[in-house]
Image: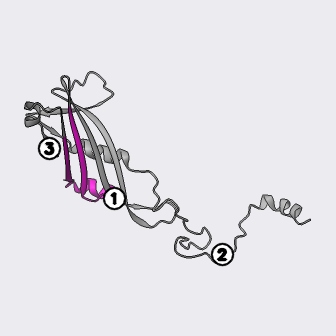
Amino acid sequence: MLIRLNKFLSSDAVSLNVNENYVIDDKEFLSKTCLNTDINLKETIFKVEDNILLNVTIKYTFLDECERCLENFDNTVETKFEAIVVQKINEDEEFDEIQLLITDGCVVLDEIIKQMIYLSMPMKSLCKADCKGICPTCGVNLNYEKCKCENNLTDPRFNKLKDLLKD
């Protein structure tokens, strides 16, 4: 993805808002992430003193598996990052902020978008907040039907305590 900043830099405007769809065509990346190819990007570009600041919100959808019920579902994630646009990246110094190189009035965002997607993907996902999961005994999905198993799963170490409750 290429952001052209020539007109913005030559204008008197202090900020620029851009809302666009981005299509990833990297087949290897798409297969690893199970990502939907369409990604929504909202960029806000600011002129602050001698610097150009870039705020980006990435919204994407990917095919995920619920950790409780093991059903596949479309998971939508929104992540944000900020970057500073620079004329030259000094590799000798460490910076806390993300730096993007401007070349011929354009900034390329392809790699940083992929990195932010990788970093923002959840490690564990639920299809819904109140997912009941599957029965550990019979394997039925408790979101769709009630389990017919007897609920007598107890730790044998606590059997002596049951005897105390009988009196």
- Please name the amino acid that badge 1 sits on: Phe
Q: Amino acid at mark 2?
A: Cys
Q: Eyeballing the image, is 53 above or below 75?
A: above
Amino acid carrying mark 3 in the image: Leu
Secondary structure beneath dot 2 equals loop
Residue 18 picture location, percent across and down: 19, 45
- Extreme residue toward the right, this view: 167
Cβ–Cβ under 8 Å for marks 2 and 3: no
Q: Could you tell me if the residues under marks 1 and 2 are in contact, i.e. CB atoms within 8 Å?
A: no
Disc 1 on helix, strand or loop?
strand
The residues tagged by marks 1 and 2 sit, at their Cα atoms, a distance apart of: 35 Å
Residue drawn at the location 20% of the way across and 52% of the way down = 22
Residue marked by disc 3: 2
Which corner quadrant of the image does residue 47 belong to? top left
The label on residue 149 is 2
Most foreground residue, 157 or 95: 95
Q: Which quadrant would the C terminus be assigned to in this image?
A: bottom right
Q: Earlier in the sequence, mark 2 or mark 3?
A: 3
Instruction: Name the image colouring.
Output: one colour
| Side (left or right) of 162 relative to 41 | right
**114 displayed left or right of 164:** left
In the picture of the structure, the residue carrying the numbered disc 1 is 62
- Name which residue lies at 31% across and 44% down: 116
Query: How many residues crowd around disc 3 within 10 Å: few (fewer than 14), some, or many (20 or more)?
Result: few
Q: Position of residue 37 (x, y in %)?
A: 24, 58
- Between disc 3 and disc 1, whose residue precedes? 3
Q: Are marks 3 and 1 in contact (CB under 8 Å)?
A: no
Give the image quarter of residue 110: top left
Residue drawn where x is 45% and y is 67% of the image: 71
- Span of residues in magenta: 17-46
Q: CA distance from mark 3 to mark 1?
A: 23 Å
